[in-house]
Every structure is written in structure tokens, then in C-alpha cells.
Amino acid sequence: MSAWILLSIVVGCTVLGDVLSSFEMKRHGEVQEFHPRGLGRLLATLATKKFLILSVFFMAISFFAFIKLVETADLSFAVPASAATIVFETILARLILKESVDARRWWGVCLVALGVILLAE
Amino acid sequence: MPPARLQWKTRLFAAIVILSNTLGNFSIARGMRGLAVPADSALHMVRAIFAPWVALGIVLLILWLLTRMVLLSWADLSYVLPVTSLGYVANALMGHFFLGEHITLARWSGTLLIVAGTVLVGMGSHTRAVRRENP
């Protein structure tokens, strides 16, 4: 499979996984307990959240596509190129998660996008 | 939690997220390239994840996933992403110095543009390291 197809799968599935997990974790609220029993309870609670389960599913697909990608493609290409997720995720953070994204962040997103395009050279 | 303490906690978790991601990806790339049989089928793919370097990488990426999810419970995704994307550069450096990858000028430029974009997104937005309180 070509590097570009694998990269698209990595990027697409990461974006879906991240947006779903951020959505579900915020619905859960800030994590404040860090002792083992608290973390165990946290895991037990999170394991019942359907968006989080879906998120893990997408991350698993993304993961297998990624290890296949780095088997042949350079790490110095594969990892920075997956920064394309930032562009899509910032847009979705604004649209779906309703986070406020100011002009400076949008310029930053544009630079990241340009950087990813340069990696393709 | 007081904002100052939450910011400290945010930075600590961001650092763990970056380190575990960089070292995890490096281990996996190293392991995948050292496989006796290429991972061309589902069976070989499953076998690959038990190769020592790949397995170590997976453990580190599990740590990455968990710390990142915990961080996302109080920090904005649009803050977490740019800050932790410093790891993209660290990954490129690992590829260059430890995997012997040749990095072209275009690729370095692209990587540096990604850093610049990252800095621009994160600059002066520390208050947003903490999600705004619900009204």
C-alpha cells in the first residue's frame, strides 16, 4: 500500500479518535484523582462511554496503519506529516467542540498546513 | 484547583505526552524495520506487535494515550494539540540521528514551519491551557 494511502488512514482515524475522546472526556469533567484506586474507578467509568470506545477503535486502526507506514517510510516524514491532524482537528474543535480559536491560532494552523505540504516535496 | 497549580500540572502532563510519544514511535520504527518477515498480512501484523522493540513502543504509546486523555479532561484540545506537536520535531530528530534517515532541505523547512505554526498557536495563550469554566 502506498505511503500516501496509509498516511491518509492514519490522519483520518486520528482526527475522528481525538475529537470523540475530547468530547467524551469533557463530558466526564476534569480528572482530579491520581491514586491507583481512583484511576481504576476512572478506567471502569470510561470503559462504559460509547464515544470513547469508538474513539479507541479509530485509534487502533490509526495505529496499525502507522506501524505499517513506518515499516517502510521515514520516521522523519511519517510523524511530522501526521501533523496534518492539527489542521483538521482545530477546525473540528471550533465547529463541534465549540472551543474558541483566535486569529493567532488560525495563523499557526496555516503554517502547520504549509509545513505538511512542504514535507510532501 | 488554583490556576497556578493547574498550569503546572498541565505542563507536566504535556511533557510526559511528548516524551512517551517520541520514544514510542522511535521504538516502533526500529522494531518494524528489524522484522524477519515483513508485516504484509494480518497474522504477520499481529506477530509484529510482539517483537521486543515494537512491544516496548506500544507500552510507551499506551502511556502516551492515557496521559493525553487525562490532560484533555481539563485542557482544550486546541491547546493540547499544538503544544504536544513539538513531539513531531523530536521524532524527526530521532529519525535523523538514530535511524540514519536523510532529511532533505524541503523536509527540514516543512518541519520548521510546523514548529513555527505550533509556537504561534501556543504563544501567549497560557490561560487557555485551562479550559474556561462552564457558566
Image (cartoon, coloured by chain):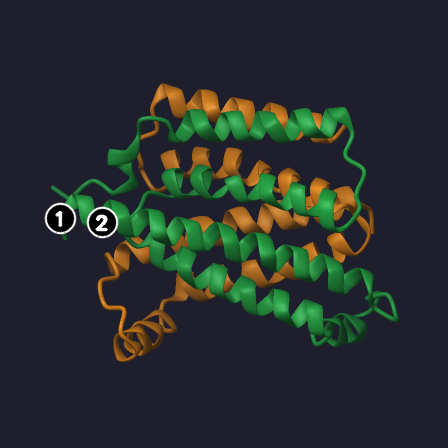
Nearer to us in this view, A88 or A119: A119
Quarter of the figure with residue A121:
top right
How crowded pointer 1 is (Cα within 10 Å; few <14, some 14-19, many 20+) is rated as few
The chain shown in green is which? B
Residue type (three-letter) at the residue carrying disc 2: Leu
Question: In the rendered image of this protein, does residue A73 appear above or below residue B39?
Answer: above
Quadrant (top left, top right, bottom left, bottom right) of the C terminus of chain B: top left
Residue type (three-letter) at the residue carrying disc 1: Pro
Question: In the rendered image of this protein, does residue A23 appear above or below residue B109?
Answer: below
Quarter of the figure with residue A37:
bottom left
Q: Are marks 2 and 1 in contact (CB under 8 Å)?
A: yes
Q: Which residue is mark 1?
A: B2
Alpha-carbon span between mark 2 and mark 1: 6 Å
Nearer to us in this view, A31 or B106: B106
Tell me the residue at 46%/20% (across/down): A107
Name the outermost residue toward the front: B97
Judge left or right: residue A26 versus residue B69: left
Query: Is residue B45 in sight in this rendering?
Result: yes
Q: Chain of mark 1?
A: B
Q: Which residue is mark 2?
A: B6
Picture coordinates of residue A26, whole percent (x, y): 29, 53
Picture coordinates of residue A95, whole percent (x, y): 38, 35
Label 1 sits on a secondary structure element that is loop
Image colour for chain A is: orange
Judge left or right: residue A66 versus residue A88: right
Tell me the residue at 20%/40% (across/down): B132
